[in-house]
Amino acid sequence: MTIAHWLIGFILSILVALFPATGHAQQTVDIIITNGHILTMDNQLTEYERGFVAIKDNKIVALGPQTKARAFKSKKVLDVDGDIVLPGFINTHTHASMSLLRSLGDDVAGRLHSYIFPLEKQFVSREMVYLGAELGNLEMLKGGVTTYADMYYFEDEVARAVDEIGLRAVLGQTVIKYPQADAKTAQEGIAYAENFIKQYIHHPRITPAFAPHGPYTNTTETLQKIAQLSLDYDVPVLTHLAESEKERDVIAKRSNGLSPIAYLDSIGALNKNLVGAHVILADKQDIALLKQHQVGVAHNMSANIKAAKGVAPVIEMLSQGVDVGLGTDGPMSGNTISLIDEFDQVAKVHKLWHKDRSLMPAVEVIKMATIGSARVLNLQHQIGSVEEGKLADIIVISSKSANMTPIYNPYSALVYSAYPSDVRHSIVHGRLLMEDREVLTVDENSIITRARDFSEKIKRALIKQGTPIL
């Protein structure tokens, strides 16, 4: 062998070592997650114990066993070393800005009308809504929520906070018959909502919506108008539905004995755009109407049991094919708005309620928190599972904390063992928002400091006027 042949062979061996053959050139992507235990939450519940996900722009472009990752290259590689990779959690019902009122009046009877409504009348403002949304967004991001549905006032301020942190959200502008800080009448509320919808209708991560507070806090005419406008604009309607005995009694009196769900059906206000939060007081006929009209249900277990309102018939809803997702309700209700805190309560309370340990298995809870919640919000073709072509909304949860060790069944670990603090990384719309618990898009310390300062203003005002801080 000549020196020239030897030199050529040596150079070729170096090139092969540096650029291993894959059958084609490596594809450059923006982010690669490697060595993950991937729970795709697709229709087959496909799982890769050692797998990868490749992200380009805002989409998932490839996933599969780790051996296929060599076909891709990226400057940003997250080697998660066996941690759990799954679609980001979707909170189908909350009021994020109420984070600034958290821990007030937690044990007060008749709390909504006797305590919360007066508090909101006094303190709700653009400043409060924006700062409260910042705080709520921060909590949800750090707890694995990548998309949430919100109902509140000045919802354009919530949108501003969402835009800054980078989350995805369905944001409903509240319409209610009582005078509020952003609208003195329901008609003004609808006009505010229409302007908000027109402003955000084409936003890539924000879906604007109408949010009538509830059937009993709005007139029949208002509910009918909103239902028609939601179809005209093709946007969601978020509402509290079949939540309380007060609501049931008011609607029964208004409608000659109909349930809230049957009443909405009778006035033409049930449709595929409607998301009903709570839905505790629903019988078989109500559930059939929900299924018939493709209404989504936001199940808020911790808020429901804290308020002693009952257990929603979710087992029956799921068995009849109703789309059910998980929600936290607002941070005055839950009181956390990290969906992970809902998981074991959802599983355990339904088992207890039906006296059947086999009901509501862990995998069903995770399905509700991901693809189930996506279906409730009519976003299942974009998010809710880790599949090629879907938007890249992905989280990574540590498998190495004391509470997550050992893991035999990843679904059981997530439902019964995980803490929100186990969430390591969060990606939304292909953008890394949190890496190793560090929030990359907003100043976490600044938000918490400003929220504390604002809470001191509330505390001083309550003390000055003699309102008990309960």
Image (cartoon, rainbow, N blue to C red):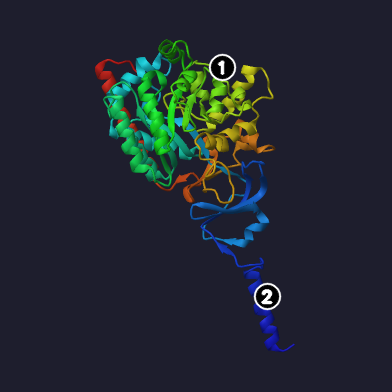
Of callouts 1 and 2, the N-terminal one: 2
Tell me which corner region of the image, top left, top right, bottom left or bottom right, holds residue 32: bottom right
What's the mark number on residue 283?
Answer: 1
What's the mark number on residue 13?
Answer: 2
Estimate the spatial distance between the alpha carbons at disc 1 and disc 2, rounded to whole Å.
Answer: 72 Å
Q: Is residue 402 left or right of residue 133?
A: right
Q: Identify residue type, mark 2.
A: Ser
Give the crowd class for mark 2: few <14, some 14-19, many >=20 residues within 10 Å.
few
1 and 2 marks in contact (CB < 8 Å): no
Q: Residue at x 47, y 10 (%)?
A: 257
Give the crowd class for mark 1: few <14, some 14-19, many >=20 residues within 10 Å.
some
Query: Callout 2: helix, strand or loop?
Result: helix
Vertical relation: 253 (above or below) 230: above
What is the residue that sits farthest to the right in this orientation? 1
Vertical relation: 55 (above or below) 117: below
- Quarter of the image for the C terminus: give it: top left
